[in-house]
Amino acid sequence: MLLDKLFSKGRKEQVVIERITEHIRLLEVACEEMRIGMEGGDLRRIHHVLRLEREADAIRRQIIAAVYEGAFLPYLRPNLCRFAENVDRVFDAIEETAYCYLEMKLPSSIRDHCLRIAFYNVRISEMLLISFLAMLRGDRLREKTLAVRIYEKKIDDLKLEIRRKLRSLPVEGFWEGKALSDFVTGLTSISDIVEDASDDLHIMHVSMR
Amino acid sequence: MWKLLSGLFFGWSLGANDSANIFGTGVATGTVRYRTAIGLTAAFVVVGAMAEGPKCMTTLDALSRISSMGAFFCALAAGLTIATLTVLAIPASASQAVVGAIVGVGLLSGTADLSPLYKVVACWVFTPVAGAVFSYLLYRIIERVLNRTVRSITRRNFLYFVGILTAGSYGSYSLGANNVANVTGVYVSAALLTPTAASWIGGMSIALGVLTYSRKVMTTVGKGIVPLDPFSAFIVVFAEAATLHVFTQVGVPVSSSQAVVGAVVGVGLVGDLRTVHLSTLGRIGLGWVMTPVAAGALAAGLCHAYTLYGRIQTP
Amino acid sequence: MKLTEFMTTNLKFVDAHSSVYEAIEQMVDYRIRSLAVCISKEKAEYGVITARDIVVKVMSKGIDPAEAKVGDIATTPMLCTDENATMHEAAQIMVDNSVARIFVCGNGGPVGVVSFIDLMSAALIARARGDHATR
């Protein structure tokens, strides 16, 4: 066990890093699919998002298994696992958003704002990948986490505006209204969770400085 | 030869207690497995004792002339004192116990030479200080070097792992080299053993303590220390090892527990953190006074009792 | 990085014939510092009214905001840039004209507004992303 760890020079760690990178890349793809699907009303893209979520779930299990098998110092393991869990929570939010989108029709009055949030979601997930790679290299994360917060703030502003408009929208019934409300909640919560994940990265960076 | 038994007991309890200072944090955080840790510690303690153990024995030898029975009582008194203070959670020093016992027995027989005592006491006082200075400097230097050379998180992860193992092995080596004199040094003074034989037997007894009874102390001490990040943990052990090694060259056995406390303070100074409570420092101060006095009084008392018993038996 | 990526799309319009009081109401309600003034939708003529205009030209002079018309104090024409402009170009226009915001206009009129804070955020993000999107 000891010699294996010494001579592999971090092969286990490499596996974890590859999986996490794949996990975040997948997140970026899912956000992009969601955006394109919403923009063109292409439901195949939305169904693809649901498939991506299942794939991401498998990757998360692989990451956590590899960490518990002894990759990385125990000091870092809880943070790594929490990061993977948070990325997975982002996928859960996207999945929920996709399901709601399939159940409802996006009102034209909030369509532009929603598309813009979907676009920022792509950007913010891209930023998460950039932050993760920077953390691996040991680069400073300050400006990366700040960028994530800026996107989050922009989405927050749009969320406020959408809420304002939603109140004046007529709904056909309870379930239609609920789907619409859940859709907006899901779409706008993605950036919040990405922000949590980016904080995890920052903690890992500081703890291994 | 049965007189060696008290030394073996003393070595065993020292091994059981002090090994926690070396791999304590590593084991408690799960970085190093317990079996790996005790294996490395035991092996390097013996190597250190064999290689540099005799260096500290001459200092103890100079303190007083001791009979073979006196040696038995010295080791016994020191062993009992350490065991008691460990129960009271005072980071007690085996060196202080032994020196106290030797001086106590020496005073009783009138052969005590207190002039080398100044050097010994000065070294005791400087042990935590040296630990703090070493850890502060090592932290600053190694941190600067690492920040320029190794930045990747996987490489650092690997480096910290190797670092903790290396520093732990070096710490075990220094512990063996420095503290074996405490265990069997008195028998060399009493001309019961040659320095080589004393190093060998002392090293083995410490190793035995590490292998058989260190788990409890290792897990509790490790978790009792402030939560250290891997880098700080590595520096603390490294500084402790360097401190013990330096005092081995001076020829004075010192306390590994106090070196560790000093090193933790030193790491705390870098980040401007209060890593050690004042009460811990107070307990060390208490230990400084209590350990030698208690061990000395106990050894002298045992010797006196034995002499009285002898007088009753002989007529 | 393109300007459209960073502009604020949350634009509010006010009619040139509306009272300044209505403009104030909108600004406070939405917590924004400027409104696009619609002079003529057919000719795509637009102006701008800012919080500064209202304070300097109306309130400090003791004029009743309910009496004053937006069209009288608005700055016209609206300072515009097209959707393909870069951050750097937008910043240059703002400096040259000494204004705090610039509107991004498409074919049908203004679609967004870019302020100092938007430019600064964009610069930060470009830096974090490691590309040279500011130029």
Image (spheres, grey):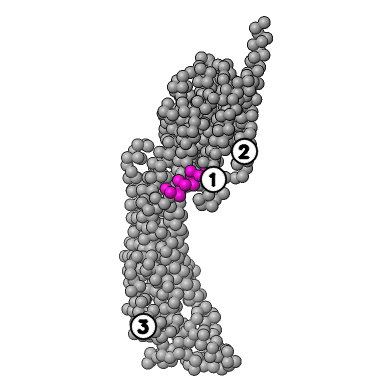
Residue A96's place in the image compared with B77, above or below, is below
Number of the front mark, 3 or 1: 1
Eye-nearest disc, 2 or 3:
2
Residue placed most toward the observer, B183 or C5: B183
Q: What residue type is disc 2 on?
A: Gly
Q: Which residue is mark 3?
A: C81
Host chain of mark 2:
B
Q: Residue furthest front?
A: B115
Q: Is residue B221 above or below residue C111?
A: above
Callout 3–callout 1 Cβ contact below 8 Å: no
The picture quadrant where one finds residue C9 is: bottom left
Instruction: Classify 10 Å Cα crowding around label 3: few (below 14), some (14-19), many (20 and above).
Output: many
Instruction: Write the residue at 58% across / 29% down.
Output: B115
Where residue C122 appears, as percent x and y from the top left, is 40, 71
Nearer to the camera, B308 or C33: B308
Label 3 sits on a secondary structure element that is: strand
Residue B285 - label: 2
Query: Label 1's element?
Result: helix
In the rendered view, tell whether residue C132 sits above or below residue B77: below
Q: Answer whether residue B133 is magenta in the image.
A: yes
| Boundaries of the magenta span | B132-142
Instruction: Tell which subunit mark 1 falls on.
Output: B
Q: Report x, y in % for residue A69.
A: 39, 42
Q: Which chain's residue wears label 3?
A: C
